[in-house]
Image (tube, rainbow, N blue to C red):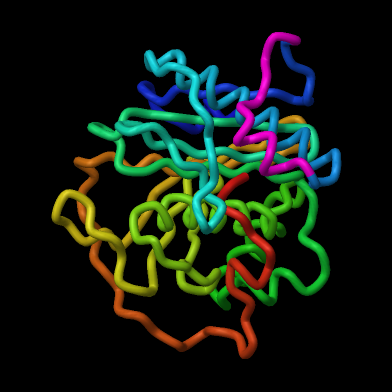
Amino acid sequence: MIRAVLPAGVAAEVAYDDARAPEERLFPQETALIAHSVPKRQQEFTTVRFLARRALRTLGQEPAPLLPNRRGAPQWPQGIVGSMTHCDGYRAAVVARSDTTAALGIDAEPDAPLPDGVLDAIALPHEIALIGSLTARRPGISWDRLVFSAKESVFKVWYPLTGRELDFPEAEIDISEAERTFRARLLVPGPLVAGRRIGEFHGRWTAERGLLATAIHLAHDAPPAPTTAARTDGRHEGTAGHRALGRSSAR
């Protein structure tokens, strides 16, 4: 599923459960990180790392521990960028060479409405109106969850480039139903990539097997987009940011 929304040159590995080859093992440093985690978390953590190492092997990389940084994002080998995601019934890891790809961000979610109260915490007025319009035209997709997923992918691209947090309302999502693409307009100064200030991220999405997936591939030669100064109109009082809602870039 995730392969359908990524370009050639990105290595991807996916699984729909936690079954794995018996010879696959975590590195001791990885095992120590989840020694006291609940079994579900141990399984997710383990599977996505097996998938990541398989993807890395296709790029000629030897297996190595994939440890999270202080924010929880995986630390990739030198010369590699990547992203991981997992949700019920799906795990995926993608990697690419950093000489051509500046950043990758992927996210998978169940194709089901967000829990009560979450949309108001993450969405801007434009996005809420967009969700209403898309739902009226095509009610079979959970568009609120797709906006959430797109913002997850945005964060997974943003954080490695900036080392800074990004609140949900600091990126405004537009979705093309027909083209299965989305645009994330940054409402704060964007990252510098190859000396250019990036004001927008462009991604793709898909929906199948009861799942939603979004992906952003940012190439080094991606054209700069007009930047937008930080603004406060349309934000919600008490809006929760990524950390407050418990998001993790580790996945």
Q: Residue at x 25, y 32 (%)?
A: 100
Q: Position of residue 72 (x, y in %)?
A: 56, 52
Q: Is residue 13 visible?
A: yes
The answer to whether 27 appears left or right of 101 in the picture is right
Q: Position of residue 144 (x, y in %)?
A: 68, 60
Q: Position of residue 163 (x, y in %)?
A: 39, 61
The answer to whether 242 appears left or right of 64 in the picture is right
Q: Is residue 171 above or below residue 232?
A: above
Q: Position of residue 212 (x, y in %)?
A: 67, 41
Q: Is residue 180 visible?
A: no
**Label total for image:** 0
The answer to whether 173 appears left or right of 229 in the picture is right
Q: Magenta region: which residues?
A: 22-35
**What is the quadrant of residue 77 in the picture?**
top left
Q: Quadrant of the C terminus?
A: top right
Q: Is residue 93 above or below residue 226?
A: above
User: Which residue of the protein is positioned furthest toward the right in this rendering?
Assistant: 39
Q: Is residue 152 above or below residue 226?
A: above
Q: Residue at x 41, y 25 (%)?
A: 10
Residue 180 colored magenta? no
**What is the quadrant of residue 229 in the picture?**
bottom left
Q: Is residue 172 above or below residue 200?
A: below
| Nearer to us in this view, 75 or 91 | 75
